[in-house]
Amino acid sequence: MRIGLKLDLDFDKDQIYQRLYGGHSVPLRLREAGVEAVEFPLGPSTDLRDAADKARVCREVGLQVSLHPYTEKHEANPAHFEGPRSVPAVIHQRFLALAAELSRDQGETVVNIHPAAGSADLAPRADLQERSVQFFAWANGWCCDNAPEVRPVAELQVAPDLEEELIRIGDRPSELSLIVNRSGVGACWDVGHAEWNHRRFGTSKHPGGELWRRIAHVHCHDVDQADHQVLRRGEAHWQRFLQELSETDFVGTVIIEVAPLTFLEAGGWNALTESIAVLKEAAGRTSK
């Protein structure tokens, strides 16, 4: 089980990053702190040459790189998928091609993608679900044909609040299981999303038997009065999940998905290193 951290592409310029990392090289300091992987968030307009350059810097210190496209409320979202010439396919093929480039150096490369999201006016839930299946089946087929070491995965989404009038496919375990099983891709289990969804709507916070076997990637963060909080010692759902995951044959990456400002507000560098330490403890990577 590899330990990773979400890392914005402007990590070398952003003032919040500079404060958190004390002006040092962010990739190098992460590696020295025991982090083994990073995940880059990408958007439809992201400069992918810049992303490739930043990935190269991270690879130079031994960090594995995964990619996490965000396309909600954009025509590139899987909600608009209508085949390989549609905008979602064209845009995501760029992300998959970047992952293919990375895979030539680092081997298996995960591209973590949210299933369809859209208003009820766009399409009924059943249609958005089917578009998600078809989108991930296309992505899986493209990788099989062009980049066999690139692994697209579908993430458990955070369920929208009722007033949002938004549908997010895969915001419950049963629906995510349907998506990954029908399309052939792996699942990204977001432990914080599962807990947050359970607290607000009573959905299951456990993957269930079949979905457990499809987990290829994990996002991890704590939940208190808000989502995406730093990891702390003490009883928490994410700890129990990782302890159970460590008893399986899971060999993927667990990404700590916490913003640098949240780390700063929680204690700065000490909060970051504590999150790494307690994650490793829960995963059985070190003794308490």
Image: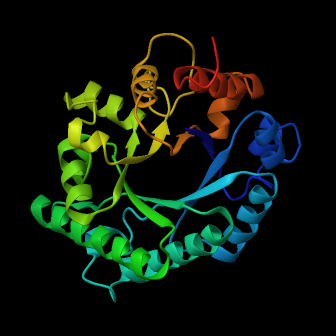
* Residue 172 visible, this angle: no
- Total labels: the figure holds 0
Q: Residue 144 or 280: which is nearer the viewer?
A: 144
Q: Position of residue 93 (x, y in %)?
A: 46, 79
Residue 149: x and y, percent?
51, 68
| Rendered view: 266 above or below 96 | above
Question: In which quadrant of the rendered view does residue 121 lie?
Answer: bottom left
View extreme (front): residue? 249
Is 54 on the left or on the right of 18, as rendered? left
Q: Quadrant of the N terminus?
A: top right
Instruction: Determine whether, in the image, residue 204 is placed left or right of residue 153.
Output: left
Q: Is residue 11 left or right of residue 80?
A: right
* Above or below 283: residue 80: below
Residue at left offset 63%, top offset 11%: 288
Q: Is residue 31 above or below residue 80?
A: above
> In this view, which residue lies farthest toward the bottom?
85
Given residues 95 and 42, the one toward you in this image is 95
- Residue 16 seen by the camera: yes
Q: Position of residue 125 (x, y in %)?
A: 13, 59
Between residue 108 and residue 234, name the one nearer to us.
Answer: 108
Image quadrant assignment for residue 279: top right
